[in-house]
Amino acid sequence: MREIIAAPAPGLDLRHHYGHHQTVAVRAGGLIFCSGMVAVNPDTGEREHGTVTSEARRIFENLKLLLESAGSSLDRLVQVHAMIYDRIEYDVLNRLYRQFVPNAPPARTVMSVQIEAGFKVMLDVIAAA
Amino acid sequence: MGLQREIIAPKDPALGVPRNLDLPLSPAIRAGAFVFVSGLVAIDPAGERMHGTVATETRQILAAMTQVLEAAGSSLEKVVKANVLIYSMLEYNNMNEVYREFFPVDPPARTVCGAQLSGGSKVEIECIALA
C-alpha cells in the first residue's frame, strides 16, 4: 500500500507554497520516503537561507516534525542523502549533523550538488515507519 | 510499532570507516526487507583512504560492499539499486568495465552522476539491497 503523508505544519507543503509537483512524504512497505527537504519556516513556508549550520538545523527540526507526525522519528532514519552546495563545508555539516543523530546514525552519502533556490543544504531521507 | 532497524558492522575492522574516521554515519542499516549501505569510498587493508584510478577504486569499493552486504546476510546479487558518484563523467567507462565484473547478470537499477567527492576519492558507491 502507498500512503501519502500530509505536511505536519503548513509551511512544509512545498507544493502549496512553491508549486513543486511532489508530496512531502510517502509511506510504503513499512518505510517512509521523504522528498528532499530545504530550510523553510514551518509556519509560513518562508525560505530561510543561511549558513550550512543554520539551514541544516532548520531542516532537521522540520524533519523531526514530519517523521513524528508519521509515527516515526529521527532515531529511525535508515538512509540519508545529504546534499551540500560545496564539499568544502563537509566538516561544517558533520558538526551539526552529529547533534541530531548522536547514536546509531543512519547510512549516509554526502553529495556536493546544485540545490534549488540558492540553498546550501538539502536532505533526502528514508525512515523506518 | 514499525519495522525493526538494525546497525550492520562489517567483520573486517578496516571497513568500519565511520568509526575509524569518526564520521556520524553507520556502514549500513537493515530495516525490514532492505539493507541500506552508506556511500563507500576506496579503503586499503589498513583502513586508510586508498587513492587510485577509477578502475582500482571501483574494484576496492565493490569488494568492500560485498563484505558489508554479507555482514547483513545479503549479497551483491540482491542489490536492487546502486548510486555511483564519480569525479568526472569522462571516466564513466573505466568505472563501468569494473562494475560489470561484479554484476555479470541481471544488474541492479543504477544511477551514475559526476560529483565533487570528499577526501580526494574518485569514486563513491552506495546501494539498497534486499536483506
Image: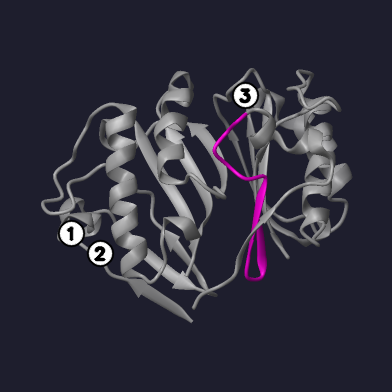
Q: Is residue B26 in the magenta section?
A: yes
Residue A46 has which mark?
none
Q: Which residue in the structure is indicated by mark 2?
A: A7
Callout 1, which amino acid? His
Q: Residue at x 53, y 48 (%)?
A: A103
Q: How is the image coloured?
A: one colour
1 vs 2, front mark: 2
- Picture disc at residue A16: 1
Q: Position of residue A2 (x, y in %)?
A: 45, 77
Q: Residue at x 38, y 55 (%)?
A: A35
Q: Secondary structure at mark 2?
A: loop
Tag 1, which secondary structure?
Answer: helix
Q: Residues within 10 Å of mark 1 (few under 14, many from 20)?
A: few
Which residue was labeled with disc 3?
B87
Residue A52 percent across, percent down from the top left:
34, 29
In this figure, what is the number of numbered marks? 3
Q: Which quadrant holds residue B50?
A: top right
Would you say residue A110 sits in the magenta stretch?
Answer: no
Residue that protrudes farthest toward the front in the picture: A103
Question: Can residue B113 be seen at all in this image of the molecule?
Answer: yes
Q: Give left or right: position of B94 versus A86.
A: right
Q: Are marks 3 and 2 on the same chain?
A: no
The chain that hosts pointer 3 is B
Residue B44 pos. (x, y %):
82, 25
Contact between labelled residues 2 and 1, with CB atoms less than 8 Å apart? yes
